[in-house]
Amino acid sequence: MKKALVAGATGYLGRYVVKEFKKQGYWVRAITRNAEQLKNLSEYIDEIVIGEVTDVGFVREICKDIDIVFSSIGITKQKDNLTYLDVDYQGNKNLLEDAQKEGASKFIYVSVFNAEKMKKLKGIQAKLKFTGALKSSGLEYAIVNPNGFYSDMLDYLNMAKQGRGFVFGTGENRMNPIHGKDLAEICVKAADGNEKEINIGGPDVLTHNEILAYAFESYGKTKKISRIPIWIRNAILTTLRKLTSVKTYGPLEFFMTVLAMEMVAPTYGKLHLKDFFLENKDNV
Ligand SMILES: NC(=O)c1ccc[n+]([C@@H]2O[C@H](COP(=O)([O-])OP(=O)(O)OC[C@H]3O[C@@H](n4cnc5c(N)ncnc54)[C@H](OP(=O)(O)O)[C@@H]3O)[C@@H](O)[C@H]2O)c1
C-alpha cells in the first residue's frame, strides 16, 4: 500500500486531500499543530503527527516510509508571528529536505495560479522561492497552481447577505474558482501523473459581476453592486503597505490583486459555485 504524508491537513484544501488519498487506497499520515482540528477526519487518517513544520527538529524523519509528500502549507489568514518566508518557503523546504533524506518518491506542492504575474507580492515571492528549490531538488515533483478556492468566494456571499456587493473596476474580469473536493482529485492524481506544473480552475468561468449575481440569487435578493475604481484600489494598497505590517497587508494585497486581473485557468470539476452558494448561504 502506498503511503502519503499530508501537510496542511487542517486547511480548506488539505481536508479534501486527506479524504481523496484515503479514497484512492493510500495509507495517510497527517500533520497538524492541533489534534482537535483533525478530530472529524480520523476515519481517513492512519497516523497524526503534531508539531510545527517550521521546527527542523519536529520535521526530522516525518517522511519516514512515505512515498508521496503533499503540502498545501501556507499562510492565508493565520495571524501567527511568522512570515511568508518562515512558512511558505522555509516550512515547506524543511519538509522537502526530509522527503529527500527519507527517499520519498514525489513531492506535490500547492502554489497559486498566475504566480509569475504576481511576483511583487510578498506571499507569492515566498511560494516562488520554494518552487525554485523544489524544481532544483532532484526529487520528482508536481506543482499544482490553482485558481481561487470556493472557500474564498464566501466573501461574495457575505456581501450579498449584507445587501451590497463590491467589485474592482467594471467587475468584468473573469475567473474560474474551484471547489476543494475537485482540486483534491487533481492533487492526488498528480501522484501518478507526469505533469510537473498543473494550472487548474473550476468548471465555471465567471465575471466578478456574475459571481455576485449568483450570491444575491442565493438569498433571493435583487443585486446591488458598487464599482470601486482601480485608482482607489491602488491607493488603498499603497496606504496599507505603508501603514500596516505584512501580516495585515499580505493577505489583502493578494486578494485585491487577483480580484483586479483576468484569472482564467484550464477548467476542471463537477462542483458548481451556484450550488456551493446555496449550500453555504446560512453559514456566512
Ligand atoms: N484560498 C485560495 O483561494 C487559494 C488559491 C490558490 C492557492 N492557494 C494556496 O493554497 C494553499 C492552501 O490554501 P487553503 O485555503 O487550504 O489554506 P488554509 O485553509 O489556511 O490552510 C493552510 C494550511 O497551512 C497550515 N499552516 C499555516 N501556517 C502554518 C504554520 N506556521 N505552521 C504549520 N502549518 C501552518 C494551516 O495549519 P493551521 O490549521 O494549523 O493554521 C493549514 O493546514 C495556501 O498556500 C494558499 O496560499 C489558496
Image (cartoon, rainbow, N blue to C red):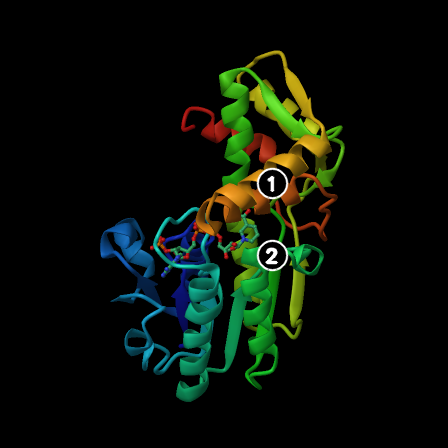
Residue at disc 1, CB closer than 8 Å to ligand 1 = no
- Identify the residue at horizontal 69%, vertical 27% (top origin): 209
Q: Reply above or below: 210 against 15.
A: above
From the viewer's perspective, tell me whether residue 140 is left or right of residue 207: left
Image height check: is 214 above or below 246? above
Query: Of 274 and 93, which appears nearest the observer?
Result: 93
| Residue matched to label 1 | 237
The residue carrying mark 2 is: 112
Is residue 43 shown to the viewer in this render? yes
Q: Residue at x 66, y 51 (%)?
A: 268
Tell me the amino acid under the disc marked 1. Leu
Q: Residue at x 41, y 88 (%)?
A: 101
Residue at 48% across, 51% down: 246
Q: Position of residue 173 (x, y in %)?
A: 75, 37
Q: Is mark 2 within 8 Å of ligand 1?
A: yes
User: What label does residue 126 carry, if any?
Assistant: none
**In this view of the protein, which residue sits in the foreground, 37 or 82?**
82
The C terminus - image quarter: top left
In the depicted view, which residue is nearer to us: 29 or 113?
113
Residue 144, image quadrant: bottom right
The quadrant in which the N terminus is found is bottom left
**Residue 107 x, y percent position in the rendering:** 51, 74
Quarter of the image where ligand 1 sits? bottom left
